[in-house]
Image (cartoon, helix red, strand yellow):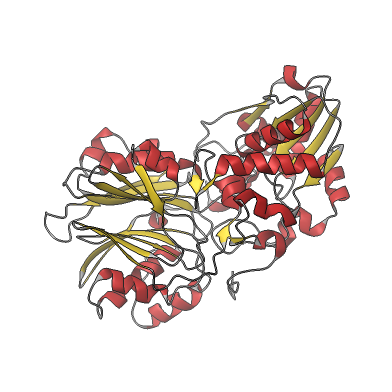
Amino acid sequence: MNNAENNILSDYIDGKLHEECGVFGAYSIENEDVTASIYYGLYALQHRGQESCGIAVSDTNGPKGRVNSCKGMGLVNDVFDENNLEKLGGNIGVGHVRYSTAGASCIENTQPLVINYVKGTLAVTHNGNLTNVAELRDELSRTGAIFQTTVDSEVIAYVIARERINTRNVEEAAKNAMMKLKGAYSIVMMSPKKLIGCRDPFGFRPLCIGKRENTYFFASETCALDSVDAEFIRDVIPGEIVTIDKNGICSDTSLCTEKAAKCIFEYIYFARPDSYVDGVSVYSSRIMAGRILAQQHPVEADVVIGVPDSGSAAAMGFALESGIQYGTGFIKNSYIGRTFIKPKQSVRESAVKIKLNVIKEVVKGKRVVMIDDSIVRGTTSERIVRMLKNAGATEVHVRISSPPFLHPCYFGTDVPSCDQLIAANNTIDEICQMLGADSLGYLDGERLSELVEGDCGYCEACFSGKYAVEPPKEN
């Protein structure tokens, strides 16, 4: 299946936005093997990327520069098994799960990216998108760099490697590189003796630190720390460089600013509901979103249901605030991987039912409030509304726990161009009619701060068009 077909399939089978990836790193000061921990960490982050995954590990006491890695296309439990995990082995390592928002979906673009250079080795994982990647790639190419991939992460690795030649250590090289990088990046990388985590000065993408006895971890979300029984220590501050070596943790905050722009959609959709992102419970954020929707867009109805998974908590919030009964209206098939067969033209209309099916007893003969996290192109939402009415719902009132998408995202989310965004080209009444819904209500953008407990340091450019970083000159 080619990349274009994958995109078409995504519209029919999923219809949701995607994050680019999740990152995970581990370093055992007591020289314990961290491979299994990285595997379980990636498993917990699988929701952040299902196209490919990889692990790279090393031994800080072994031959310098030897890195064992394994990566491939597909889900974590498809790529890794007991045999290839046993062949890795090491007390320091990094892992990655990927969904491609920039760069094709192919094995060459799978991370971690392992490079060998004059100072040793680097294994780099990255979450986010650079806005100046075209300029950096051109500059590096003109000075002899030969690229093997089309992803931002390789550009980051090259910039760090070149800076390392003229610096005292790898963390200083990372700092110099960060001053050249623009856009969104949470980086976890491994040198022969150190594990380093970096977060861009705006903190677009999450990154946190954990510890289990004498093993330290970096992770995109706290749920990954829970999966390896690690204690959450803290979040990496936007602009911070955290280095872990045999002596423990040290930090460089010299690039930190007060201009945070953390992605609001982490709370609305991307992160797992049991995670905390920058100290805020994702579950509580979604409950609050549902409560706000009930306040702003009340309706007489018999049952409130959520589109799994991220719509479920918001639906509970709507039910709590409105007093309308909450019900489980859908069953989700969680076992569809990237190898799912592309439907033929004649049966594409039913493809969404393979992913999601209605429990008829919950909705038949009832006025239904359906809560979802977003509407992008509208095709999937229209099919879900039709499914509910075909199952006997007398009315379907759609409520969306985010404002309308009006602008593309350049920071690691696959919000498409404006011409593909249904809200950028239609009024709410027109969208409601296109969905076949009886009413439609979005979350008010002015109340987004309530989802993050009043924190105003978040990015909501996909709703407002107010970008914290200048968008790239070419897409």
Going by the picture, which residue comes out furthest to the top?
361
* Residue 82, above or below 403: above
Q: Residue at x 64, y 30 (%)?
A: 356
Q: Residue at x 66, y 30 (%)?
A: 353
* Residue 70, above or below 410: above
Q: Position of residue 1 (x, y in %)?
A: 52, 46
Instruction: Locate residue 261 relative to residue 348 in the image: left or right.
Output: left
Residue 74 appearing in the image: no
Instruction: Locate residue 329 relative to residue 474 in the image: left or right.
Output: right
| Residue sitting nearer the eye, 33 or 299 | 299
* Residue 419, above or below 377: below
Going by the picture, which residue comes out furthest to the front?
454
Find residue 186 and report its image quarter: bottom left
| Residue sitting nearer the eye, 368 or 456 | 456
Q: Position of residue 77 (x, y in %)?
A: 38, 35
Instruction: Locate residue 437 relative to residue 114 in the image: left or right.
Output: right
Give the number of callouts.
Answer: 0
Q: Position of residue 226 (x, y in %)?
A: 39, 38
